[in-house]
């Protein structure tokens, strides 16, 4: 065989992704030993040129405009990547079965996330949740660790004893340590980004601050002795971003800062749901690494998910929510009408607190139609979409409408686009922490069991079920995608028909139709029955007590007095009996 024939060959293809909207580049090759191979190169930034090959395949050109993400590839990018793979294959010795490229854990997570965002259009809060998970994996496994090293089986041990970390305050950390719990300081790294021209400048004198504020222009503020801060107009606060976004923004001239914190964390065995979430996301990242040729197989394929059967709850427990009396007690402890309205949005309208209440706009409250329309959310100090796309108009109870009207009776944030719970500086809604702290304090003052503020939504659902509202209506009002989520509330729905069926089957004598009625027209018959039934029961009880020696025998005079009272009752009954009863006797 000639040298030319022994060289690896290959080609690239553009294929439609599983979502039916986006496309990706794939590389296919045959190496110098005749073995076939292939992998996904990345999302495609292409457009149809209108031309076709001899076999009828589309000839693709680079898409219009800039690439949506750094991971997107043009046809030339895809050909360059295929050429690099073929060069690597050509230098591969006979019998060697190793990945053709090397990628780190950070490369895998960032590449998978970019692919996922291009295919699914993830929400900002979802992306932030993924990045939190990746930060944990970086901390435990090393961000720059080559993914090929995970093939040694270390991930089995990692997930066999998987822990969860929960941030604690200083006081809670001291208490947990005193109780013998595992509490540690954990270093966490975050990245923030600011647009160019947003950074503040600190000067020493007031005169310098005034001059600089006029030049920028901007505003100045005295921070401490000998320190004045000047902030440019329209400056934006630093926003948390991922490592990949930080690198991209830095290339565009943004102000990037790396921030490190060491909070106290409680370390405990992870719940099955938490472990499974990390395992599933990490497995998807490693699948991406396999497609990139960085791993021969996914090492997490042999790590099974943990069963959650022992953690499942068929219904909400009574300790998970408040009933209406407890809601009333809570509202009486609200420090102001703002907190009262905030909590009522959860208890009387089923809002997901605090996000959907903080994101509520003035224009979404319709006092004429007496409904609220949920369109917005507030997550991680920024506006976001709601958890589900459904937006059913929710009728307001009178007390909720009154509370919202009082909140909106103000001289600031009066436009329809302003937040209902706007802060006085107008930069956004009030602090989420302040609402949580007020809720906890009101719980303690009212002597209520501790629940999450979010669980006021469960009070809304269970109360509707208790009042006989059908499951479909509750699903629409609570904006659930799946009715199985709503069915947890139906355990509190009254079922009189089923109760009657069970009673007829198991306790039929207690039913009204099986109880002998007492005719109201015969007082003599009533007294006759009482004389027959009640004294007999009393007699049996008295005999038992005397037999056990718990009580001395009554005196003869007392017995004679009881007999006289019985004779008087019989005489009275005979006098008051109807005429036809006396004649019949």
Image (cartoon, rainbow, N blue to C red):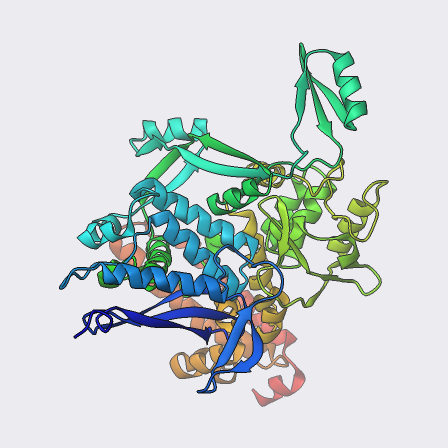
Q: Nearer the viewer, residue 59 or 36?
A: 59
Compared with residue 322, is residue 7 higher up or lower down, i.e. above or below?
Answer: below
Locate residue 492 relative to residue 431 in the image: left or right: left
Above or below 419: residue 35: below
Furthest residue toward bottom: 584
Quadrant of the image containing the N terminus: bottom left
Which residue is painted at 62% across and 54% down in the image? 384
Q: Is residue 446 visible?
A: no
In this figure, what is the number of numbered marks? 0
Instruction: Name the quarter where the C terminus is drawn.
Output: bottom right
Give percent across and percent down for residue 444.
Answer: 55, 37
User: Which residue lies at the image location 44% right of the left edge and 36% below the top edge?
Assistant: 189
Rendered view: 235 above or below 413: above
Q: Position of residue 58 (x, y in %)?
A: 50, 80
Q: Position of residue 267 (x, y in %)?
A: 33, 39
- Which quadrant would residue 46 be assigned to in this image? bottom right
Between 532 and 87, the residue placed more toward the observer is 87
Q: Is residue 13 visible?
A: yes
581 or 448: nearer the viewer: 448
Task: State the residue lying farthest toward the left.
Answer: 95
Question: What residue is shown at x 75% (from left), y 14% (from top)?
Answer: 208
> Residue 234 at x, y = what percent?
74, 37
Residue in front for this viewpoint, 77 or 445: 77
Left or right: residue 527 versus residue 412 is: left
Question: Could you say which quadrant of the image residue 91 lies in?
Answer: bottom left
- Does 464 appear above or below 500? above
């Amino acid at each position: 065989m000639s040298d030319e024939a022994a060289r690896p060959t290959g080609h690239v293809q553009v294929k439609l992704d599983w979502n039916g909207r986006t496309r990706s580049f794939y590389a296919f090759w045959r190496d110098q030993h005749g073995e076939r191979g292939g992998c996904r190169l990345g999302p495609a930034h292409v457009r149809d040129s209108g031309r076709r090959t001899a076999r009828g395949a589309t000839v693709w050109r680079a898409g219009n405009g800039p690439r949506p993400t750094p991971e997107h590839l043009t046809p030339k990018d895809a050909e360059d990547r295929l050429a690099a793979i073929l060069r690597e294959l050509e230098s591969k010795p006979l019998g060697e079965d190793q990945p053709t490229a090397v990628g780190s854990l950070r490369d895998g997570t960032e590449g998978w996330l970019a692919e996922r965002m291009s295919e699914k259009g993830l929400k900002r809060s979802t992306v932030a949740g993924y990045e939190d998970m990746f930060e944990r994996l970086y901390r435990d496994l090393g961000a720059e660790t080559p993914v090929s090293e995970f093939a040694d089986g270390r991930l089995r041990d990692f997930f066999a004893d998987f822990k969860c970390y929960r941030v604690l305050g200083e006081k809670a950390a001291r208490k947990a340590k005193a109780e013998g719990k595992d509490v540690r300081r954990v270093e966490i790294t975050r990245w923030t980004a600011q647009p160019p021209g947003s950074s503040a400048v600190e000067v020493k004198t007031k005169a310098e601050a005034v001059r600089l504020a006029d030049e920028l222009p901007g505003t100045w503020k005295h921070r401490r002795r000998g320190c004045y801060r000047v902030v440019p107009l329209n400056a934006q606060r630093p926003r948390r971003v991922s490592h990949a976004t930080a690198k991209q923004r830095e290339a565009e001239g943004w102000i990037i800062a790396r921030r490190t914190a060491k909070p106290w964390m409680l370390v405990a065995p992870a719940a099955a749901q938490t472990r499974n979430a990390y395992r599933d996301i990490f497995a998807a990242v490693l699948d991406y690494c396999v497609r990139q040729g960085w791993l021969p197989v996914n090492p997490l394929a042999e790590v099974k998910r943990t069963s959650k059967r022992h953690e499942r709850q068929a219904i909400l427990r009574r300790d998970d929510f408040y009933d209406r009396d407890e809601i009333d007690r809570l509202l009486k402890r609200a420090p102001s009408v703002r907190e009262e309205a905030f909590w009522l949005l959860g208890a009387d309208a089923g809002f997901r607190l605090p996000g959907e209440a903080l994101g509520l706009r003035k224009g979404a409250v319709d006092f004429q139609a007496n409904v609220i329309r949920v369109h917005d959310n507030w997550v991680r100090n920024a506006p976001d979409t709601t958890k589900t796309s459904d937006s059913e108009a929710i009728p307001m109870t009178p007390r909720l409408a009154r509370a919202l009207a009082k909140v909106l009776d103000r001289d600031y944030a009066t436009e329809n686009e302003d937040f209902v719970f706007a802060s006085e500086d107008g930069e956004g809604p009030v602090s989420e922490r302040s609402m949580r702290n007020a809720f906890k304090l009101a719980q303690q003052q009212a002597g209520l069991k501790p629940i999450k503020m979010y669980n006021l939504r469960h009070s809304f659902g269970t109360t509707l079920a208790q009042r006989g509202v059908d499951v479909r209506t509750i699903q629409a009002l609570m904006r659930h995608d799946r009715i199985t989520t709503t069915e947890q509330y139906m355990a509190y729905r009254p079922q009189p028909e089923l109760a009657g069926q069970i009673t007829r089957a198991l306790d039929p004598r207690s039913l009204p139709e099986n109880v002998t009625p007492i005719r109201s027209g015969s007082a003599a018959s009533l007294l006759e029955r009482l004389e027959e039934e009640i004294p007999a029961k009393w007699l049996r009880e008295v005999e038992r007590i005397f037999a056990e020696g718990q009580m001395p025998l009554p005196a003869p005079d007392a017995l004679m007095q009881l007999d006289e009272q019985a004779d008087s009752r019989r005489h009275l009954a005979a006098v008051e009996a109807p005429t036809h009863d006396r004649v019949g006797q």
